Amino acid sequence: MDLLSVASVRRKLDRIEHLYGVNSPDEAGGRPVNGIDRFFWLRASERENAEKPRFAFRSGLEAAEGDSTGDFRLCNLVLQGGGTLGLAHAGFVAGLERAGIRFLGLAGTSAGSIIAMGLAAIRGPDLARETHRKLADLSSSAPMDSFIDGPRPVRIFIKRALKRSGLFSPAFWFSVIAAVKRLRDRRGLNYGDVFETWFEEVMRELNFESIEQLDAALERIWEDISDLSTPAFGHDIPPPIAGNDTDDPDVRSNRHRDLLQLVTTAMPVGLKLTLPQDLSYLDPEYQRVSPARLVRTSMSIPAFFEPVMMRTNKTTWPDLAGETLGRLLPPNRLNYFKDLDELVFLDGGLVSNLPSDSFRQVMRDVPTIVVPLYGDQKNPSVTGRRAYSDLVSDALSCISAVRLQRDREVWQQNIELGREFERQEELRVSQHGGVARIYPTRMAEVNTADKDWLNFVMTEHDKTELFQTGLNAAEAFLKELKRQ
């Protein structure tokens, strides 16, 4: 299925490029005329006959010297988890790339981690490489139906439950019993092996067979953006990324891993880990596994997929457990966590489904787009208690409240940081001139309406609709920025 060949998709992409691209009619005068330039203030172009660093960077708030045809805008991208709705992320990426935008840092949880890793692998060591065509192909061709890979009775249970058909047949109720037993014994209805094998093959085709190869690509990009850690933008604009101002050699040598951040939940501790950066707390042998394993840890939907088991690094893990839990637990409990030989990894959405602070420290002034997925849901009754389903609704609401609280608090911090940023920009412009930037962390919501996030039996029509939903959200995001 070729999503980009759909007529309505082609027209939308052409429209975005014409109205919001780097070389759109509004850009002809060589000076910023709207909020797109004030948000996407950071631009890059490839140097001629230069090995390292490969790119020259400038502020898009100023007129370019000479031809700016090869310019592209830079930003970070944070993608929320959402099960099979992640296909909408692919449409969003397509829209932004056609507007001349490339992604520096990539972060995601669950479905967002699949797209983030896909983007990182497709671009490889080339920051300027276009990714959306290959990403659309991979997303639309994913064999979602086969990801339901549990034993046959369990597959019957899941598929009939998703399609809401045959729910009163004897075969269905037999499958319910089989599903309950499997949850008891394996903590997940499906193995998750088919997904991991498929994604391993995707990584192999993109020349990413191991974490070591992923590291090499990220390290090359980090070298290419080294100039961004020094003041060079005029009007007292600070460096967009933090410099290597640490004495810790391990931190300095792994800075490139901040360019890709996949969130997962380490149990039984309940600790948020970010991969590949936090691989240092796991057995060194995992450096040689496929990057697909990192994605598998982030998208292990509780109960739906079996969790991933990985061994700890007996040198570094006890220190992390002590630092994060030392004052919160009694000594016997703390020692239990320090002595763990293995960790159980569940979906990162349990601790941070929308990690909007992913790049706050290392790339503080690089524009960052945070992309949540939400749909139309029935509002439960708060006072009326007439159905047993209300009990289920209450339980799910409690789980959701706990699960999303961290993300709410982090986004509230962003709002407060945005106000302070605006004050600092006003002061900078009054003292040094130039144009005020828009706070470089912004949310771009994608409304997936009534689409089911566990629909692993999606039709081609459903896939096209989801992709277009993300594409429409990208256009709406750019349109809103342009008005400012």
Image: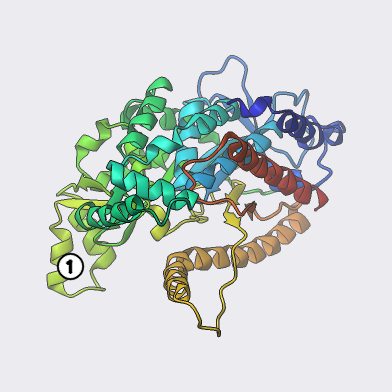
Which residue is pictured at 12% across the width and 58% down the height? 339
| 109 and 123: which is toward the camera | 109
Q: Quadrant of residue 206?
A: top left
**Most distant residue in the bottom direction:** 383
Colour mode of the rendering: rainbow
Residue 455 against residue 214 in the figure, above or below:
below
Image quadrant containing the N terminus: top right
Is residue 246 visible in the rendered structure shown here? no
Is residue 321 found left or right of 30 in the rendered image?
A: left
SS for dot 1: helix
Q: Position of residue 341 (x, y in %)?
A: 14, 51
Which residue is pictured at 26% across the width and 44% down the height? 280
| 115 and 103: which is toward the camera | 115
Is residue 135 visible in the rendered structure shown here? yes
Q: Which residue carries the number 1 mark?
A: 334
Is residue 148 found left or right of 332 in the rendered image?
A: right
Q: Quadrant of residue 322?
A: bottom left
Q: Position of residue 440 (x, y in %)?
A: 63, 52
Q: Quadrant of residue 378?
A: bottom right
